């Protein structure tokens, strides 16, 4: 018997795999240059001839413009540019008139582009959302020149971190700018009204009146702000907005754990908790700590405590007067010390609102070389400090400082900025003197 070659075995194996496979390999082209995802694919009889085409919302890789492609078999039949990146594609019947050719809807950003016979037919834009009141107030202040760009940036960042509503596109673009570009951007856009626009994240169709395959359908849009919009296929107006308005949990029918929800558009949603569901208790404790319920071991009242209580009861008025006298003396001494510090320029806190600064000095070392650390802090609540210069004034016959001048960076309110230098004592007799630290603000352009 003749031996069979390896090529014969491979050929027979390939034929056997193809015969047993549930799929036929109709076409394979790794260089088709189609870049998309499932939501941007649709199959439809666009010309009413019984032959279905493939509609592709192509993303346009490598910085290329997005395109709408229609494929007949393996070949691209038509191709047209899109104004923005597509998010979803769907085909639907808009009317009952002949010929019964479906329209093509392509969702992109806040808009839905409708095509009939592969030509632009209608554009629907989502309604604008109300802006954040705090964001609107900040831009109104910028319009009236009552707020500087740095403070505007800081306040917008605070709103972005804490507010539930996202910022407008104008504010988001402003937060991405460099420090040198902020003032020009504010001057250019401060007169514009704040607009907040949501985008479409998903799209499908819903039969309007009949459940037939060739019935008129409505477009259903899912937006980024958790809304569900149903559009009329003829006038392209919003028929319904669905958002959950009420919740109820309990026994319903024969099920104990049932969650019932109603939507703003009048919808009803019923969810039943699975009997096999397992919930893991969280690590954080709820309610007061266990130590709060523990009784304190209060010692018994001693004879000294009782005598002291009787003394305070009998001489309460005299003790209160002595306390008030000592308190007034303490306030007087503190005021005199503060006045003396201001007069000798030794105060660690700025006395003017133009320079809201706090300075704290720390000296380390045993000598003759010491380390001097100046801790600067901006005591303002919202306004940063820019263009600050710090200089050390000292007796050059007693001390030597390799660095006596500092150009301070931008001081953010509340943060501590350390400035370090070394001090060398030149006297061998142990003579010491005061090193004064002065700070001044200069315009940023100098």
Image (cartoon, rainbow, N blue to C red):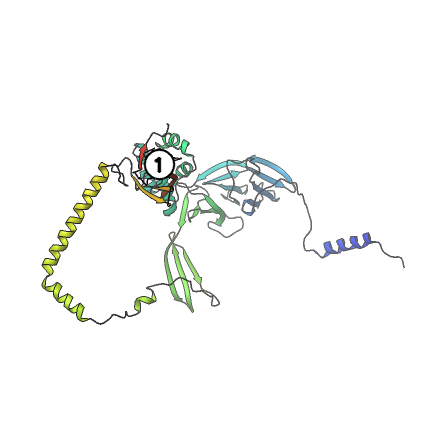
Tally the marks.
1
Q: Relative to 430, does residue 290 appear above or below in the rendering?
A: below
* Residue drawn 17% across the image and 68% down it: 304
When asked about the image quadrant of residue 296, the answer is bottom left
Quick one: 180 or 307, which is closer to the camera?
Answer: 307
Q: Quadrant of the N terminus?
A: bottom right
* Residue drawn 15% across the image and 66% down it: 309
- Which residue matches tag 1? 399
Quick one: 284 or 127, which is closer to the camera?
Answer: 284
Q: Which secondary structure, mark 1? A: strand
Quick one: 421 or 266, which is closer to the camera?
Answer: 421
Residue 120 x, y percent position in the rendering: 51, 35
Q: Relative to 276, does residue 368 appear above or below in the rendering?
A: above
Residue 45 x, y percent position in the rendering: 58, 44
On the picture, is 52 further left or further right than 410? right
Q: Is residue 193 visible?
A: no
Circle 1 packing at 10 Å, graded few (<14), some (14-19), many (20+), is some
On the picture, is 404 further left or further right than 4? left
């Amino acid at each position: 018997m003749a031996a069979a070659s390896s090529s014969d075995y491979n050929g027979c194996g390939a034929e056997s795999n193809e015969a047993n496979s549930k799929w036929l390999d109709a076409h394979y082209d790794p260089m088709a240059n189609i870049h998309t995802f499932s939501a941007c694919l649709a199959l439809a009889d666009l010309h009413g001839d019984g032959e279905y085409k493939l509609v592709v919302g192509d993303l346009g890789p490598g910085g290329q413009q997005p395109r709408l492609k229609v494929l007949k078999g393996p070949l691209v039949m038509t191709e047209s540019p899109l104004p923005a990146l597509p998010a979803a594609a769907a085909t639907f019947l808009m009317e009952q008139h002949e010929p019964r050719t479906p329209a093509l809807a392509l969702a992109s950003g806040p808009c839905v582009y409708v095509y009939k016979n592969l030509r632009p037919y209608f554009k629907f834009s989502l309604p604008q959302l109300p802006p954040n009141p705090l964001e609107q107030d900040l831009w109104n202040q910028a319009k009236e020149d009552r707020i500087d760009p740095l403070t505007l940036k800081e306040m917008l960042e605070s709103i972005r971190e804490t507010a539930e509503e996202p910022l407008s596109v104008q504010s988001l673009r402003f937060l991405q700018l460099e420090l040198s570009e902020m003032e020009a951007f504010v001057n250019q856009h401060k007169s514009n009204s704040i607009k907040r626009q949501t985008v479409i994240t998903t799209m499908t169709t819903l039969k309007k009146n009949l459940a037939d395959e060739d019935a008129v359908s409505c477009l259903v849009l899912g937006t980024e702000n958790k809304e569900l919009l149903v559009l009329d296929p003829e006038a392209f107006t919003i028929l319904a907005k669905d958002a959950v308005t009420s919740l109820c949990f309990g026994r319903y029918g024969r099920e104990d754990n049932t969650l019932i929800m109603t939507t703003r558009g009048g919808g009803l949603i019923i969810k039943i908790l699975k009997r096999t569901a397992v919930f893991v208790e969280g690590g954080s404790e709820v309610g007061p700590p266990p130590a709060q319920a523990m009784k304190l071991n209060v010692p018994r009242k001693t004879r000294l405590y009782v005598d002291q209580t009787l003394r305070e009861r009998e001489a309460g008025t005299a003790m209160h007067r002595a306390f008030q006298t000592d308190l007034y003396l303490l306030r007087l001494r503190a005021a005199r010390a503060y006045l003396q510090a201001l007069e000798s320029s030794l105060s660690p806190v700025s006395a003017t609102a133009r320079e809201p600064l706090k300075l704290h000095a720390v000296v380390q070392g045993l000598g003759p070389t010491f380390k001097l650390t100046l801790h600067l802090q901006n005591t303002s609540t919202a306004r940063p400090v820019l263009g600050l210069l710090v200089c050390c004034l000292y007796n050059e016959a007693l001390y030597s400082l390799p660095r006596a001048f500092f150009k301070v960076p931008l001081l953010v309110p509340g943060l501590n900025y350390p400035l370090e230098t070394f001090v060398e004592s030149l006297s061998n007799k142990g003579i010491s003197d005061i090193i004064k630290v002065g700070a001044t603000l200069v315009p940023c352009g100098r």
